Image (tube, rainbow, N blue to C red):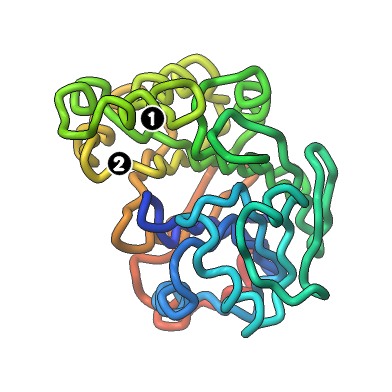
Amino acid sequence: MSLFIASLNSGSNGNCYYVANQHEAILVDAGISCRETEKRMQRLGLSMQNVKAIFVSHEHHDHIRGIPVLSKKYQIPVYITTNTLSHGSLTLDSHLIRPFKAHEEIRIGDLCVSAFSKHHDAIDPHSFIIKYNSLTIGVFTDIGTVCERLISHFKQCHAAFLEANYDDELLTKGSYPYHLKMRIRGGKGHLSNAQALDVFKAHKPSFMSHLLLSHLSKDNNCPNLVKELFSGCAGNTEVVVASRYEETAVYQIHSDSSTIRINMGRPLESMNVQYSLFS
């Protein structure tokens, strides 16, 4: 029994996260173009035909830009709150709109997806938990501050996408105007490296195999800095910095905490394996 996860892109230029079992996949957000999503999926050996749903965290452009074309082309249902839909200026086919509410369990084949509210400067923002039998994956980005809901769900995760948006010193000394700096660190903006590290150190479960650090700022953070910061206390958890320029590998997550990195940028078939055979 396994889940497969990858970041297709992560940053203010677009966010898209992939979670799948052997038979069906979902995307959390689709903030890069349909064409770019297709290219990155193809490079990873993943099929768009397996994507059965897109879940929308909030209405900001870097999370929704690719959704209308992607949903229409592949007839993928879009799970979105009513408030987010009304504020996102999304043009979606009505038969593909699936409203959801926090804490509601949504079945996508054998995947169980639920959402909980988070602190961010959007109309109705949510983080997501994806479960498959005994496995749990969390998608926790665009978080202004750590809350008990985040901590409670993080403790359950075998793998997670966790925001580490900015370094405090780089943001303070950087060229952003004061009002933007305050927006970023003001409680409804983004999570700093230090805040994310505190969550990781204090609440990482022993069985967490992978942490994908996500939504890094281009101007106020440094991938090498973040990697070093987290790796020093990661233990058996592999720390991956999700790029704003390219997809990560696909990671296979097992319930017994052992994991296999199944893709190094080559299609799965080139490695003489079949996606449907992983278990």
Task: Please name the amino acid that badge 1 sits on.
Answer: Ile
Q: Which residue is drawn at 62% across and 44% down?
A: 137
Q: For residue 227, which quarter of the picture?
A: top left
Quadrant of the frame with the C terminus: bottom right
Q: How far apart are marks 1 and 2 (CA)?
A: 10 Å
Task: Please name the amino acid that badge 2 sits on.
Answer: Ser
Q: For residue 64, which quarter of the picture?
A: bottom right
- Closest to the observer: 87 or 103? 87
Residue 56 point in image, percent of width and height: 64, 54
- Look at discs 1 and 2 and give the one toward the viewer: 1
Residue 212 in view, yes or no: yes
Circle on res. 163: none
Q: Does residue 214 sit above or below 266 in this rendering? A: above
Q: Does residue 196 sit above or below 70 in this rendering? A: above
Mark 1 secondary-structure assignment = helix
The residue to which callout 2 is attached is 217
Left or right, 23 with reference to 209? right
Q: Which residue is drawn at 37% across and 39% down?
A: 239
Residue 4 in view, yes or no: no
Question: Mark 1 near mark 2, Cβ–Cβ under 8 Å?
Answer: yes
Residue 183 point in image, percent of width and height: 40, 28
Mark 2 secondary-structure assignment = loop
The residue to which callout 1 is attached is 184
Left or right, 145 with reference to 227? right
Residue 85 point in image, percent of width and height: 70, 56
**Badge 2: few (under 14), some or many (20 or more) residues near its Cα, within 10 Å?**
many
